[in-house]
Amino acid sequence: MQLISIKNLNKYFLQPAKMQVLTDVSFDIEKGKFIAITGKSGSGKSTLLYLLSTMDRDFEGSIRINREEMHGKSNPWLADFRNHHIGFVFQFHYLLAEFTVLRNVMLPALKLRKYSPAETEHHAMELLKLLGVADQAYKRASLLSGGQQQRIAIARALINEPLIIMGDEPTGNLDSYNSAVVFDLFKKLSAEKGQTILMVTHDEDIAARSDQTIHLVDGKVDAITNR
Ligand code: ADP
Ligand code: MG
């Protein structure tokens, strides 16, 4: 099944001068695959991922996710869609420093209200265990190391069981040991839970181990490699 289908995506920035950042970008992504988006700095990777995340509504062309067209949808509709289906991990984790680790992981689920707070807490603890940081649950987030905080951010991205997990260089700020931990976890999720992973990365080892690489040059798809 094609989970994501992009057709003739064009994106312009108008400031400081009109500039086309993405040109006729088209590709399909199958459910459960691990996708790496690669390309030099400035090639449009972050812009593309931001569009796919549905946070930027200003584009030409079509973005279909899980059979829904994103073009023309209202902000509240998109916010609800994102909350249900998409989890994000960024290079910098943006945890709420004064909250406990456990609370940080629970927040997106408390907002969604699909499960009771007790069930959510149980689920959050399970994720912290999966990520090897359950012993940190009651500490303030700001007291953890960078690698630990990144794992908390991943747990938070997973709490609503999203169809798609997106990361913009999520390992860019980590040492090679923690990068490998994060990468292996993403691999495991796509293999075991059928979650689709979309990752912008500079890391050639990660790209080489993905199922599909989408390589951008100057805002155009230069090559799509399937493994
Ligand atoms: P990458 O993530 O591959 O490094 P980006 O998507 O961040 O590339 O940027 C692609 C191009 O778009 C760059 O030339 C960048 O300067 C430009 N750009 C990115 N964001 C904006 C913005 N908000 N306004 C104007 N230009 C932007
Ligand atoms: Mg970028």
Image (cartoon, rainbow, N blue to C red):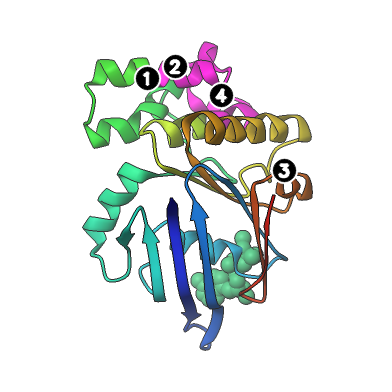
Q: Which mark is residue 126?
A: 2
Q: Amino acid at mark 1?
A: His
Q: Nearer the viewer, mark 3 or mark 4?
A: 3
Asked if the residues shown at circle 4 and circle 1 are in contact, with their CB atoms under 8 angstroms apart, the answer is no
Q: Which mark is residue 209?
A: 3
Residue 148 in view in this figure: yes
**Sequence-earlier tag: 2 or 4:** 2
Identify the secondary structure beneath mark 3: loop
Asked if residue 205 lies in the magenta stretch, the reply is: no
Q: Is residue 52 left or right of residue 73?
A: right
Which of discs 4 and 1 lies nearer the camera? The answer is 1
Q: Which residue is mark 1?
A: 123
Q: Residues within 10 Å of mark 1 (few under 14, many from 20)?
A: some
Residue 181 horizontal side relative to residue 139, left or right:
right
Q: CA distance from mark 4 to mark 1?
A: 23 Å
- Amino acid identity at mark 2: Glu
- What residue range appears in magenta? 123-151
Q: Secondary structure at mark 4?
A: helix
Instruction: Name the residue that disc number 4 marks.
Output: 143
User: Counting other residues with Cα less than 10 Å from the Cα at mark 2, is it few (<14), some (14-19), or many (20 or more)?
Assistant: some
Q: Earlier in the sequence, mark 2 or mark 3?
A: 2
* Prevailing secondary structure of the magenta residues: helix
